[in-house]
Amino acid sequence: MSAVRKLKLKPQPKVFHAAMLVTRAEEWWVEADTAEEARALLASGRGHHAALGERVHVELEELFED
C-alpha cells in the first residue's frame, strides 16, 4: 500500500456566515435642565456618544452556508 493511501485526509471544514444580534452597554451624555428632559433627549437619539462599552449579549439570528 502506498504512503498516500495510508494517510487519512481530513475533509476541509466548511465556511459558515451568520447574522448576529449584538447588544452593547454604551455611555452617552446630554445637557438638560432636568432628568426627565435628559431621558427624553436620549430616547430621541439626540445625546452624544461617549464610549462603545462592552458587549452584553450576543444572539445568533440566522446561519448561512456557503
Image (cartoon, rainbow, N blue to C red):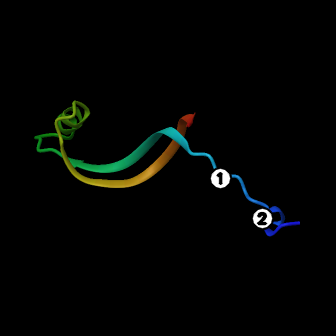
10 vs 52, left or right, is right
- Secondary element at image label 1: loop
Q: Which residue is mark 1?
A: 12
Cα gap from disc 1 to disc 2, whole angstroms:
17 Å
Q: Residues within 10 Å of mark 2 (few under 14, many from 20)?
A: few
Q: Quadrant of residue 41?
A: top left
In primary-sequence order, the first of circles 1 and 2 is: 2
Disc number lying in front (1 or 2)? 2
Looking at the image, which residue is at 82% across and 62% down?
A: 5
Apparent side of residue 24 relative to residue 33 in the rendered image (left or right) = right
Horizontally, is 63 left or right of 29 in the view? right
Q: Hey, which residue is sitting farthest front in the picture?
A: 2
Residue at the spot 55% in from the left edge and 34% down from the top edge:
64
Residue 47 x, y percent position in the rendering: 18, 41
Q: Disc 2 on helix, strand or loop?
A: helix
The residue beneath circle 2 is: 4
- Farthest residue, direction right: 1
Q: Viewer-proximal residue, 52 or 34?
A: 52
Image quarter hosting the C terminus:
top right
Determine whether, in the image, residue 33 is placed left or right of residue 58. Answer: left
Report x, y in % for residue 63: 57, 36
Q: Quadrant of residue 54?
A: bottom left
- Callout 1 environment at 10 Å: few (<14), some (14 to 19), or many (20+)? few
State whether residue 43 is above or below residue 7. above
**How many numbered tags mark residues here?**
2
Using the image, tell me which numbered label, if any, was put on residue 48. Answer: none
Of residues 40 and 23, the one nearer the viewer is 23
The amino acid marked with disc number 1 is Gln
Please name the residue shown 19% across and 39% down the image. 38
Q: Nearer the viewer, residue 6 or 10?
A: 6
When the figure is inspected, residue 27 is found, relative to residue 63, above or below; the finding is below
* Three-letter amino acid code at the position of disc 2: Val
